[in-house]
């Protein structure tokens, strides 16, 4: 018989304790400890995955042989971008998102498009008929995509050893259950144990593994925080279920940049890649409106042109309101203080509302100039020309500061048909503006822009 003991686990970080604690000593959260039963493994107990190497010896780093293996490039350009150029052999990728956002659709679509790879799709939530019904709605078909509906890791790894797949997809990790742990599926110890088993298999057999994870009410991945430390890449699938656009964002990546994102559009036939997101982030208008400015930002290596919408009105209820959607509220307060101090605009008695079109959350300082001009445009009720865009940071002294990679920002604006782009004059040093068809206007202070556009 296996020895059974009781332990308490923090639902936030996974810290275990032999007794209940009100406050977690690891993460500092209150009332997060839950009692779980743990079964210790017998010597003759079940072995979920037998290690290929029984012993491991230390080696000098100069003795280790390394050959860079080519990445597996899928037909999904957006996924290749967020993964850093393609799927890395032996990598463990965790994909999180709200229920119904499209995680299973994305992974099944990837499995069906990899026709030259043997893909095993493991589902612990849906039946084979449900998965087949979703696959019928997609245009792509593949005889190399295999479906396994089970949640016991013992049977799963038995099937994996017989099949030897090239890529594994687990939907979802919270439904998996290991016989080495007595608790039910979805508990902290079960999630950690099952992730550890899939990670061990992926590393020792060099098999890429994708795991779908649920998220909690506050938007973080369900299960212990150690789960994110165990995997190689964490992808967050975001978006509003009431709109058709989805964003795949990288929050951790051991094989590439963590600032990349991919944009999809949910359709009846699956997820469509949005190769030119700037067109959907800029709304089409029949007439010019005040308070709207176009700014250039960078997400990883991708330049995006997004629309900044501002509304300034008289505060009729005492304390002026400062509200921003998709933009840092503290940075908005700073820019308003700069406009009041350096520009002479009386915004202290005005309500200011700021919105980033498209549902994006941005943090690029290059959007400062677009935010400032959109606020002043709404304050003066003077529309900005639709063919003008901005790309510069604003300092506390009212100066227009330079930003990085200005060449790619100018090229993106030119590609989308803008006629003029305002940049910092310190960005034009060594920049040959004659190479561009778009007019590049360098400015040093905010009042120079206001005199040209809003006076």
Image: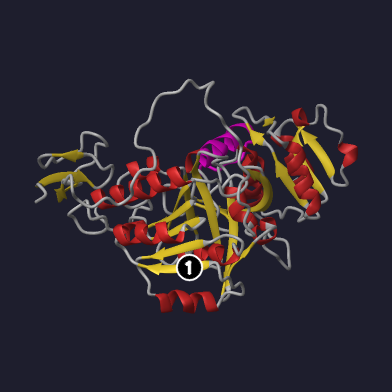
Q: Which residues are magenta?
A: 331-353
Please tell me whether residue 410 is drawn above or below residue 384 in the rendered image.
Answer: above
Q: Is residue 40 magenta?
A: no
| Percent coordinates x, y for residue 71 in the rendering | 61, 47
Query: Splitting the image into 4 quarters, where does residue 263 fall?
Result: bottom right
- Can residue 357 be seen from the camera position used here? no
- Can residue 115 be seen from the camera position used here? yes
Query: Splitting the image into 4 quarters, where does residue 270 fall?
Result: bottom right
Label 1 belongs to which residue? Answer: 146
Residue at x-position 75% and y-position 42%: 408
Q: Nearer the viewer, residue 436 or 21?
A: 21
Quarter in which the C terminus is drawn: top right
| Percent coordinates x, y for residue 88 in the rendering | 55, 46
Relative side of 311 to 198, left or right: right
Residue at x-position 56% and y-position 47%: 83
Residue at x-position 34% and y-position 48%: 197
Q: Which element type, helix, strand or loop, lies under badge 1?
A: strand
Residue at x-position 80% and y-position 52%: 415
| Percent coordinates x, y for residue 92 in the rendering | 45, 47
């Amino acid at each position: 018989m296996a020895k059974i003991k009781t332990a308490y686990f923090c639902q936030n970080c996974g810290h275990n304790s032999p007794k209940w604690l009100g406050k977690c000593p690891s993460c500092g959260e209150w009332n997060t400890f839950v009692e779980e039963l743990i079964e210790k493994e017998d010597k003759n107990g079940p072995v979920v995955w037998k290690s290929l190497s029984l012993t491991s010896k230390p080696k000098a780093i100069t003795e280790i042989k390394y050959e860079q293996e080519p990445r597996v490039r899928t037909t999904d350009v957006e996924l290749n971008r967020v993964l850093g150029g393609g799927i890395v052999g032996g990598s463990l990728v965790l994909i999180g998102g709200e229920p119904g956002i499209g995680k299973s659709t994305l992974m099944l679509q990837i499995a069906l498009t990899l026709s030259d790879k043997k893909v095993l799709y493991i589902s612990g939530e849906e039946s084979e008929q449900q998965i087949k019904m979703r696959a019928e709605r997609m245009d792509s078909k593949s005889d190399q995509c295999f479906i396994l509906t089970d949640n016991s890791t013992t049977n799963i790894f038995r099937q994996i050893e017989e099949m030897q797949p090239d890529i594994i997809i687990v939907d979802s990790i919270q439904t998996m259950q290991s016989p080495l742990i007595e608790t039910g599926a979805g508990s902290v110890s079960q999630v950690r144990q099952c992730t550890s088993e899939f990670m061990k298999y992926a590393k020792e057999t060099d098999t890429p593994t994708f795991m779908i994870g649920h998220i909690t009410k506050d938007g973080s991945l369900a299960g212990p925080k150690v789960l994110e430390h165990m995997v190689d890449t964490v992808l967050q699938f975001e978006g509003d279920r009431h709109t058709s656009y989805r964003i795949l964002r990288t929050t951790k990546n051991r094989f590439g940049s963590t600032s990349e994102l991919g944009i999809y559009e949910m359709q009846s036939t699956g997820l469509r890649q949005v190769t030119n997101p700037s067109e959907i982030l800029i709304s089409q208008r029949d007439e010019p409106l005040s308070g709207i400015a176009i700014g250039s930002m960078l997400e990883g290596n991708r330049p995006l042109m997004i629309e900044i919408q501002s509304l300034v009105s008289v505060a009729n209820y005492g304390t002026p309101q400062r509200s921003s959607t998709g933009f840092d509220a503290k940075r908005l307060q700073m820019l308003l203080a700069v406009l009041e101090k350096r520009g002479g605009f009386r915004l202290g008695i005005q309500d200011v509302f700021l919105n980033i079109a498209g549902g994006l959350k941005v943090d690029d300082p290059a959007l400062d100039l677009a935010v400032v001009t959109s606020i002043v445009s709404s304050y003066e009720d003077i529309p900005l020309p639709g063919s003008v865009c901005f790309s510069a940071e604003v300092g506390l002294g009212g100066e227009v500061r330079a930003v990085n990679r200005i060449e790619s920002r100018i090229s993106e604006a030119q590609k989308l048909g803008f006629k003029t782009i305002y940049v910092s004059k310190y960005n034009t040093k060594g920049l040959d503006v004659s190479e561009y068809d778009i007019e590049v206007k360098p400015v040093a202070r905010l009042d120079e822009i206001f005199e040209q556009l809003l006076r």
